[in-house]
Each structure stands twice: as structure tokens, then as C-alpha cells.
Amino acid sequence: MDGKITLVLLGREYPLPDVLICAILACDLAGFLLGTYYYYGPQISHTSLLLWPFVPDCPLAAGFIFLAICLLWLGRKNDVANMFAISAGLAYGLWTMGVLMAYPDFYNGYNGIFLSAALWLLHLFMVLQALMLIRETRFTPVGISAAMAFLFASWVSDYGFGTSPPIPLYAFAEIASATFLLVAGVFIAIFLLKESRIFDGLLSFKAARDSGKT
């Protein structure tokens, strides 16, 4: 199954070997499992079962990306799965990168400076993967509606029912407002990026069946 996914980078195409795809998938799966268990495990244990899907924000985004890339690799691409991966990957990835830079004293004290730096880089990787999936995604009403409903429900849960990741309490209102704007802006940005096709030749995943086509 080598070459089932092609990486498009700066206008050139590079068929990805299975071992590299497996490594990417392993990183995403590890992000989902380890992030959920180690980073959010204590919070999940003290949260109502009904709100569990809204607790491990970033690990869940990594899980969506894992599923989307896995399906693409197997030739069973799913546009709804892709939309969840793109929207959650961008929203949660950019959110984490943003708060780590905006409130370094809080997060360096909470995580330690080295873990904060590692988290920033890992979430940059998440954002890049989300952008790379745009090319292979058809924007369907079901996919867009479901992804929007999930992210806005997550926002309500995080800032209305206390399932947000650790944030400085003195900046609660500021972060809640910025997060709402970020979630709304993500869907506008996805639409504009899809229409402009700017990432198609710059940085994207391309299904093997399209190789050689313009």
C-alpha cells in the first residue's frame, strides 16, 4: 500500500511510504491516548459522564486527525471525519498555541517551561495536519453542521460547565470570549482556504488516485 497518500510540498509531490504514514498515525494516536489519560484523566474522573466528550479537547482533536488520515490511507476517505479533524485540529491547536504564548507565567508554572515548549510544537504539528487535509475534503452540509455543533457545544461546556483545560482564572472572561471568536473564525477560515486552494500546492495530503492529475 506504499504511495496511498502523496505529500504535496511547495508544488512538488512526494509519495509517502507506509512506514512514514504509520509513524504519523502513531503520533496522533499517542496524542489522543496519552493526552486523555495523563493530562485530562484527573479532570475526567471528576466530571459528569455526559460531559466527558468535551473534556479532552486537544487529545480528541488528535483522535479525529488519526481517524481522518487512517481512512484516507485505506482509501475510505470520509468528508465528515475530515471536517471534524480540520475544525477541531485548527481550533484546539491554535487555542493551545495562543494561550501558551499569551500567559507564559501561568503555563510555565503549571507545566514547566520544557513541557510548555513541547506542547506548543506538538500543537503546531496538529494545526499543520489539519490544514493538509483541506484538499481532500468536500464541504458537505452534514459535515459542516455536525462539526460546528460539536465545537460550539464544547465551548458552552468548557466555559459554562467548567470542562475547559486549565486556564488562569483572572483571564477567564477574556479567554472565553476569544475562544468563541476563534471557533467562529475557524470555519470562515476553512471556507476561504478551500475556495482559494492556497494549501493545495503549498502543503497538503493528496490521495494516490489523484496522482498525476492537475
Image (cartoon, grey):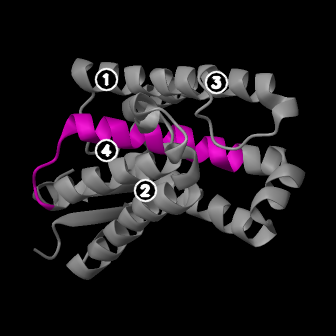
Residue at 43% across, 46% down: 61
Comparing marks 4 and 3, which lies closer to the viewer?
Answer: 3
Whether tag 4 and tag 1 are in contact, CB under 8 A, the answer is no
Mark 4 and mark 1: Cα distance apart in space = 19 Å
> Mark 4 highlights which residue?
135
Instruction: Classify 10 Å Cα crowding around label 1: few (below 14), some (14-19), many (20 and above).
Output: some
Mark 2 and mark 3: Cα distance apart in space = 34 Å
Residue 207 lies in quadrant: bottom left
> Mark 2 highlights which residue?
203
Mark nearer the N terminus (3 vs 1): 1
Q: Position of residue 119 (x, y in %)?
A: 64, 62
> Mark 3 highlights which residue?
159
Comparing marks 2 and 1, which lies closer to the viewer?
Answer: 1
Comparing marks 3 and 1, which lies closer to the viewer?
Answer: 3
Q: Position of residue 50 (x, y in %)?
A: 40, 29
Q: Is residue 130 visible in this depiction of the protein?
A: yes
Q: Classify mark 4: helix, strand or loop.
A: loop
Mark nearer the N terminus (2 vs 4): 4
Mark nearer the N terminus (2 vs 3): 3
Instruction: Classify 10 Å Cα crowding around label 2: few (below 14), some (14-19), many (20 and above).
Output: many
Whether tag 3 and tag 1 are in contact, CB under 8 A, the answer is no
Comparing marks 4 and 1, which lies closer to the viewer?
Answer: 1
Q: Classify mark 3: helix, strand or loop.
A: helix
Q: Position of residue 146 (x, y in %)?
A: 31, 23
Mark nearer the N terminus (4 vs 1): 4
Q: Which residues are magenta?
A: 74-98
In the picture provided, is 2 more to the left or to the right than 23? left
